Image (tube, rainbow, N blue to C red):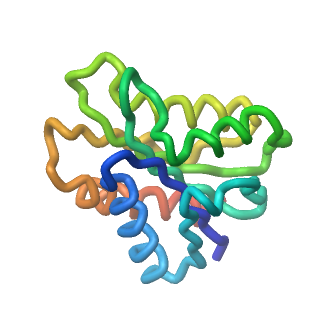
Amino acid sequence: MKKVNLVFGTVYGGAQYVAETMQQLLANSGYDVVLYSSDELVDFVPPQDELLLMICSTTGQGDLPDDILPWFLMMQSTAPYLPELAFGIIGLGDSSYETYCGAAEQLVALFEDLGAKQVGEFLKIDAGETMEPEVAAEAWLPSWCERINNL
């Protein structure tokens, strides 16, 4: 099975908890999984022969959390073209705001600009509807795994 690299951006810890939950579920399913903390992302460019799963909350007016912003800016300015990279995305936000899941949308746009291909549905988890985002992510994960297994 391919390796899955997990990257998260969080303000209050919710996205990190979802990422940790995904790490455990993927590992239990036999995947080789690495969860990157923000300080480990300094020069990290996802290898194209591995998978990338990003979990990101939104802050302010659709902004990226401070912990993932440096990585985003590094990727935006120095990352190579990544046409063989497959990625998944989980966004946490509040649909009562116009910028609902805006940070995750920025990540999608960046990786599409780099040539990467999104695999599976963009999961948007609404804080106004669920108090346990990890439960929604857990329900989404089997369909994502099915798609990545068919790559």
Residue 113 position in % (x across, y down): 72, 29
Instruction: Report x, y in % for residue 93.
Output: 30, 36
Number of marks in picture: 0
Q: Quadrant of residue 48?
A: bottom right
Vertical arrangement, residue 76 with respect to residue 84, above or below: above
Residue 118, percent across and down?
59, 42
> Where the N terminus falls, by quadrant?
bottom right
Q: Nearer the viewer, residue 145 or 87?
A: 87
Residue nearer the viewer, 42 or 109: 42
Residue at left offset 36%, top offset 21% = 99
Please identify the residue farthest to the top as the structure is shown: 98
Residue 29 lies, with reference to residue 39, above or below; the image says below
**117 sits left or right of 30 in the view:** right
| Residue found 49% across the figure and 46% down from its top | 89
Please report the residue visible at 61 percent of the width from the left and 29 percent of the height from the top.
Answer: 109
Q: Is residue 82 left or right of 91 when viewed as pictured? A: right
Q: Residue at x 38, y 42 (%)?
A: 57
Q: Which image quadrant: the C terminus?
A: bottom right
Near-viewer residue (79 or 146): 79
